Amino acid sequence: VGDHFTHVCPQFTPGSTPWRFSKKGRCGTGTAISEEESPRDKGDHLQAYLHGHRLMSLMPLLESQGVQTVEDLAQVNLQELKLLVGHDEHRLMQVELLQALQEDKKKHDFILLNDGEMKSEHLIFLSHFKLEAGTEAALMRGEIESLLRQNGDEAVFEWFNSPIFLDSEDLYNLEDLTRRVRKTHNLVLLLTKDVLTRPWCLVELVCAVNYGVRILPVQVMKSGDSFSFPDEDFYTKLLGGQLLDHSCMALLTEHGIQLGDVEKAIKSVFKKIALPYSPHRSETIRRAEVQALLKQVRPRNPHSDNNVGARRSRR
């Protein structure tokens, strides 16, 4: 009621806004969902969101697809949901409304990115070990850019100076690297055999964790370069100083990074399931893999932009 719909109203059921983040509007200040909220709290937000849009009859079907939070709605396969609904015209209309809401949300997120200080330099930062994945990272960047354009997201290339950034280009020193990490929305870590022993990659991970940058692990699938996921033996060797060489340790120490910081950063990465990227498979398969990655890409929350890192840097 008024000059906007409920799904863009920042006062609609505190915490239930469908946007990744909100901004001040005519009717007040939005409330963003906190990253620290419990799963139960986030489930309540989902229920409030569906109830507010009169979509509650979809709740059981959404739960069967693993949807637990408002953010999970972005991952819903709407075509599959329509098949589950069958010939129920009322529910089919609800699925179409849900699709419209998600498309509206996507446009709204990118509009906010262009709002003053909300504009960042990079939507995605591709972190990789150049010797093992330099070619693959360049290939992935090209495919991401192509899919963004095909998905109708050309505006990304106007709003970001460099939407998809490779950590092996345009870097003059480590300070420049960490500045770019702080100014990115999503850090994609390409998992190859020795990436977790490379000093610059580790600095990027620690910086991303400290500054609240979303980290998305992607396993590069190619023969002769199998990535082993960290186990307890890995962390024991890391903390015991048996994993990293002298030059790596010296670089970390020079920049005030302790092995405990590295352990914490690596563990935080693997709280998410790694997505595959198969550079030597067909273009169709690669496109599907990159599309799955793009579904995980999100603009960062402006209410917490660099706040965590800023607090730590003052200690």
Image (cartoon, rainbow, N blue to C red):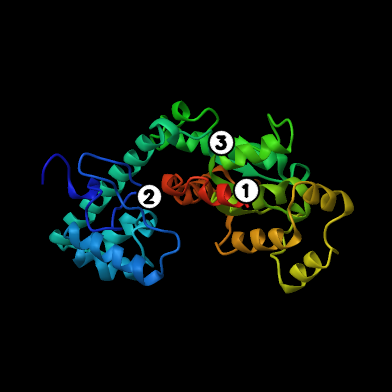
Q: Residue at x 71, y 71 (%)?
A: 231
Q: Which residue is mark 1?
A: 313
Q: Amino acid at mark 3?
A: Ile
Is residue 172 visible to the viewer in this orientation of the structure?
A: yes
Q: Is residue 277 visible?
A: no
Sequence-earlier tag: 1 or 2: 2
Query: Which amino acid is tagged 1?
Result: Ser
Badge nearest the viewer, 1 or 3: 1
126 left or right, relative to 195: left
Q: Which quarter of the figure has residue 258?
A: bottom right
Residue 113 percent coordinates (x, y): 41, 36
Where 53 sits versus 229, above or below? above
Element carrying mark 1 = helix
The residue at which mark 2 appears reads as 20
Q: CA distance from mark 3 to mark 2?
A: 20 Å
Residue toward you, 50 or 145:
50
Relative to the observer, which residue lies in front, 313 or 23? Answer: 313
